[in-house]
Image: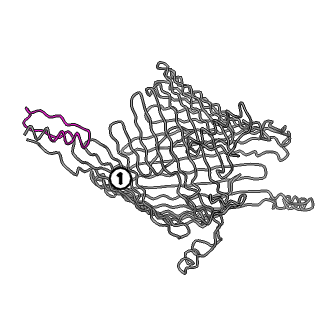
Amino acid sequence: MKRRIILLNLCLLVLFGLPLTSTAQESEMHTLVDPLTVSGIVGTQITSSWNNADLHYNSPFSAIGYANMTFNVYGISVPMSINFINVNAKQFSFSEPSVMINFRPVWKRFTFHFGTSCMNFSNYTYNGISFDGVGMEYKGKKFRFGGFYGNFDHATTFRTELDDRDAIQFLSDSLLGMNNVAYTTFPQFKRKAYAAHMAIGSTRNYVDISMLHAADDLNSLPSEWYMYNIYSAEVIDTTLVVRDSTIKGKENLALGLKGHFTIGKHVMFEANLGASLFTPDITREEIVLEGEGDVEMANKIMGGFRKAGLFNVRYGSEIRFAGDALLNLNFKPVTATLTYRFVQPDYTSLGANGFNQNAQVYGTHLSTSLFNNTAFLSVNGFLQRDNLDKKQLYTNQVGSYAVNWNNFFGDNVGLSVMYNGVTQKQLNGVEVVPEDIRVDQITHSFDLSPSYTLSLESDHTFSLDFNLLQNKNRNKQLEWGGFNVTTTSFGVGYEVYLMPSRVSLNANYDYSLSRSPGNDYNSHSLSGGTSYRFIDKDDLTLSGNARLVMAFNLEKSEIEEIDETGRQVLDYLAHRVGARPDTEITNDLSVAARLGASLNYKDHHNASVYFSISNYSDNIIIGQHVAVNTDVRFMVEYSYSFASRLIKSKKIK
C-alpha cells in the first residue's frame, strides 16, 4: 500500500509538478484536490432591431453564442472563452460565423494567454487592446513581468460609400440576387505586435517599465492592392508597394515608465511617463543623415534600432511624449488629490486608446464626511489648456468645477445638492484673438433632490428634483450675441413595492422650460412602470415588467428672414389679433413602450426576453435636432451556469 502511494505521488510530481503528501500511519486518505473540475457559463443572445433613421449603421439582426469555462486540473486553473457563433447582419446581409478562443491557464503566480486575450501594462504603451496570440504574466510579491506576441487586427475592408436603399428594399434585392452595388472599399493591414513590462517592488512602492512594438504587414492584403513591378535604373523591384490607398501601413515603438511610492499612511505619489516613435506610412524611405559628430551618432542609434527590429526611422516618423502625475493625501476624514497630465500633439500608441491630444490638464479633488457619517461633501476642479506646441491659431482653455453634498436625516429623509460649472475661453495663439469673435462663456448647473421613504406594510418612496442650467456669453463684443440659454426643470417621482402581491409600481413626471433669444422650448414627460413576480420560490423565479413613456414638446421660434414692410404688417396683425404670426409653433408627441420578462431556475438557468417600440416625433432641443424616427427592438437571451466536478475525490485505503 505504501509503495502505491509513493508511486502515485511521483507520477503526479512528474506530470503536474504538484506533490501530494502522505503518511503510512493514516488508515485512509484523500487526494488534496479533485483531479478535474469544471465550472463556467454557456449562453446565447439574439437581437433584432429596426430604425428608419439609422438604416446604414444599425444592424437589424445579430446572434452570438459563447462559453466561458474554467478547468481545474490538480490545482492548475485553466480558464477558456469561446465565441462559437457571431452572426451580424448589416442591411440583412449576413456574415460568416466566427470562432474566438481564449485559453488562459493559471499556475501558482503564472498566467498564460493563448488565443484572443488582453493585458494592461501602461496608459501610454499598451492598455488592454485585444490580441490574437500567446502571452505570459508573472505576479510575485517583489517582482512582476509579462509579455505577449500576436496580431491586433485582421485584414478587413471598410465600406466608404453607401447606397440610398432602405432596409426593406435591400432585403428584397438580396432575395432576388440583385445586390451588386459597387462599393468603394479600403483594406486594413494585419497588425503584428509584441509588448512586455517588468515591475520591481511591492504594491506600495514599485517601478514599472513597459514597451510595445506594432507594425502593419504589407503582405496581408490581396495582391490587387499592390504594384509588383517598380522600375528603378532598369532593375525590377518586386517589393510590394501600396497603390493609391488611403489606408497606410504604420509602425510604432512606445516606451513607458511608471513609479508608485507610498510615504507612511497618509501620502501616495504616482507618476506615469510615455514616449512614442511613430511612422504613419512605412512605405516611405528610411532616413540616413550625412555628416560627422552628432550626425554620425544619430545614424548609429537609428541603425541600432533597425538591426534590433525595434523601429525603422523613416521620413515622416515622429517622436512624442506624454505623462501624468498624482499626489494623494489621506488624513481621515479628509482625502485630497492633485493630478496633472500632458499629451503632446499627435501622440500615438497603436496599443492604447483615448488620448486628449495637444493638451495639459490640472485637477484637484477633496472629499470628507461630516456629522457622524450622515453627510458627505466632495469638491472637484479641472483646468485644461491646449496648444502645447504653440502652433494653433488660438488657444482654448476650459475649466470645470463641481460641488456635491449628500445628507441623510434619519432613516426616511435624504437630500442631495449638486452644483457644476464650466468656463470656456479663447486665448491668443499664433494670432491674437479678435475681441468680436472671442469665445468666452460660462455654464452653471444647480440640482436639488430631496427624497422621503415611508415604511408601512410596503415601502413608499417619494422624490423631487429641481434643476437650473444656464449658459451665458461673457463677451459683450461677440457679433452674433453668443449662445445664451436658461433651462429650468422640475420632476416628481413615486415608487412602491407591495410585498403581499409581489407588485412594484413607479411613476414620474418631468417638466422643463428652455429659453434663448428667439426660441422657447417646453417639454412635458410622463412615465410609469410596473413589475410582477408570477413565481417567487427558492429555486424558481419568474417576473415580468412593462414601461410606458410619453413626452410632449412645444417649441416657439421667431421667423427671422422678413423685410421692414412685412414686419410692419406683422406688428399691425399682432395689435389687432393679439398674437404675432411671425412665430413658428411646433407641437410634437413622442411615445415609447417596453415589455419584458425574466426567469431564473436554481441559479443555473437564466433567460430573458424584451420587446420595445418607440416613436420620437421631431424632438428638437436647443442646440440639437433629433429627426423623426421609429425604433423597434427585440431580444432573447439565455445562459446556463454550472460548477460540476467531473471526477470525484477518491478514498485511498
- In the picture, measured across the screen, residue 461 lies left or right of residue 106, that is right
- In the picture, measured across the screen, residue 484 lies left or right of residue 13, that is right
What residue do we see at 64% from left, 57% from top? 247
Q: Is residue 181 above or below residue 4?
A: below
Q: Quadrant of the N terminus?
A: top left
Residue tagged by mark 1? 502
Between 152 and 436, the residue placed more toward the observer is 152
What residue do we see at 70% from left, 46% from top? 316
Q: Amino acid at mark 1?
A: Arg
Q: Is residue 86 above or below residue 438?
A: below
Q: Using the rendered view, name the quadrant where residue 278 is placed.
A: top right
Q: Is residue 526 above or below residue 52?
A: above
Residue 303 lies, in percent from the top left, at 62, 39
The magenta span reads: 7-32
SS for tag 1? loop
Between 463 and 211, the residue placed more toward the observer is 211
Between 458 and 57, the residue placed more toward the observer is 57
Residue 639 lies, in percent from the top left, at 36, 57
Between 420 and 247, the residue placed more toward the observer is 247
Residue 281 lies, in percent from the top left, at 66, 51
* Residue 25 lies in the magenta-colored region: yes
Q: Quadrant of the C terminus?
A: top left
